[in-house]
Image: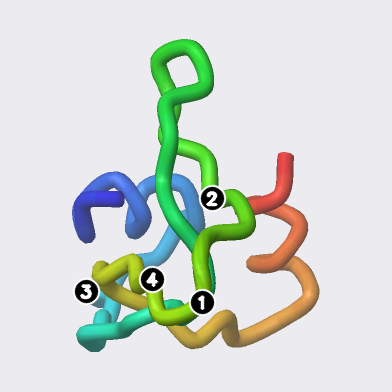
Protein backbone atom coordinates (compact mmCIF):
# COMPACT_ATOMS: atom_id res chain seq x y z
CA UNK A 1 0.00 0.00 0.00
CA UNK A 2 1.26 3.46 -0.81
CA UNK A 3 2.19 5.52 2.27
CA UNK A 4 -0.23 8.34 1.34
CA UNK A 5 -3.15 5.89 1.07
CA UNK A 6 -2.23 4.22 4.37
CA UNK A 7 -2.06 7.64 6.03
CA UNK A 8 -5.55 8.47 4.72
CA UNK A 9 -7.09 5.12 5.72
CA UNK A 10 -5.74 5.51 9.25
CA UNK A 11 -6.70 9.20 9.44
CA UNK A 12 -3.21 10.27 10.48
CA UNK A 13 -1.76 13.78 10.23
CA UNK A 14 1.89 12.67 10.39
CA UNK A 15 3.56 10.61 7.68
CA UNK A 16 3.57 6.86 8.28
CA UNK A 17 6.86 5.07 8.86
CA UNK A 18 7.32 2.00 6.69
CA UNK A 19 10.22 -0.41 6.81
CA UNK A 20 11.42 -3.00 4.34
CA UNK A 21 10.09 -6.47 5.13
CA UNK A 22 10.17 -10.08 3.91
CA UNK A 23 7.72 -12.88 4.62
CA UNK A 24 9.15 -16.38 4.28
CA UNK A 25 7.22 -19.44 3.13
CA UNK A 26 4.51 -17.52 1.27
CA UNK A 27 3.74 -16.38 -2.27
CA UNK A 28 1.48 -13.77 -3.88
CA UNK A 29 -1.38 -14.41 -6.28
CA UNK A 30 -4.14 -12.26 -7.74
CA UNK A 31 -7.57 -12.38 -6.11
CA UNK A 32 -9.69 -10.25 -8.39
CA UNK A 33 -8.06 -6.81 -8.44
CA UNK A 34 -6.21 -7.48 -5.18
CA UNK A 35 -3.05 -9.35 -4.24
CA UNK A 36 -3.45 -12.29 -1.84
CA UNK A 37 -0.83 -14.02 0.29
CA UNK A 38 -0.93 -17.83 0.35
CA UNK A 39 1.23 -20.69 1.59
CA UNK A 40 4.22 -21.16 -0.68
CA UNK A 41 7.10 -23.53 -1.13
CA UNK A 42 9.76 -23.78 1.55
CA UNK A 43 12.25 -21.01 0.90
CA UNK A 44 9.88 -18.78 -1.08
CA UNK A 45 9.74 -15.13 -0.02
CA UNK A 46 7.52 -12.12 -0.54
CA UNK A 47 9.17 -8.72 -0.19
CA UNK A 48 7.44 -5.46 0.58
CA UNK A 49 7.08 -3.07 3.46
CA UNK A 50 5.62 -3.19 6.96
CA UNK A 51 3.86 -0.71 9.22
CA UNK A 52 3.79 -1.12 13.00
CA UNK A 53 0.12 -0.75 13.97
CA UNK A 54 -0.15 1.65 16.91
CA UNK A 55 -3.57 0.75 18.35
CA UNK A 56 -6.53 -1.61 18.17
CA UNK A 57 -8.41 1.17 16.35
CA UNK A 58 -5.77 1.21 13.58
CA UNK A 59 -5.95 -2.58 13.38
CA UNK A 60 -9.72 -2.43 12.81
CA UNK A 61 -9.38 0.29 10.18
CA UNK A 62 -6.95 -1.90 8.21
CA UNK A 63 -9.01 -5.07 8.64
CA UNK A 64 -12.29 -3.74 7.24
Residue beneath the point at 53% across and 59% down: 40
In the rendered image, the residue lying farthest to the front is 42
Could you give the CA–CA distance between mark 2 and mark 3, rounded to whole angstroms?
26 Å
Could you give the CA–CA distance between mark 2 and mark 1, rounded to whole angstroms?
14 Å
- SS state under label 3: loop
Q: Nearer the viewer, residue 35 or 58?
A: 35
In the rendered image, the residue lying farthest to the top is 32
Q: Are marks 4 and 2 in contact (CB under 8 Å)?
A: no
Place of residue 22 in the rendered image (x, y in percent of width and height, measured from the top left) = 34, 82
Mark 4 or 2, closer to the camera? 4
Residue 3 - label: none
Q: Are marks 1 and 3 in contact (CB under 8 Å)?
A: no
- SS state under label 1: loop
Residue beneath the point at 54% across and 50% down: 37
- Other-residue count near label 1 (Cα within 10 Å), few / some / many at <14 / 14–19 / ≥20: few
Name the residue carrying label 4: 44
Could you give the CA–CA distance between mark 4 and mark 2, rounded to whole angstroms?
12 Å
Earlier sequence position, callout 4 versus callout 2: 2
47 is higher (above) or lower (below) than 40: below
Residue 56 sits in which quadrant? Answer: bottom right
Name the residue carrying label 3: 15
Could you give the CA–CA distance between mark 4 and mark 3, rounded to whole angstroms?
31 Å
Earlier sequence position, callout 2 versus callout 1: 2
- Other-residue count near label 3 (Cα within 10 Å), few / some / many at <14 / 14–19 / ≥20: few
Name the residue carrying label 1: 42
Amino acid sequence: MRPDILKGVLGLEADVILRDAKVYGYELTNWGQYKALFDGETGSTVTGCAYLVQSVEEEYKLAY
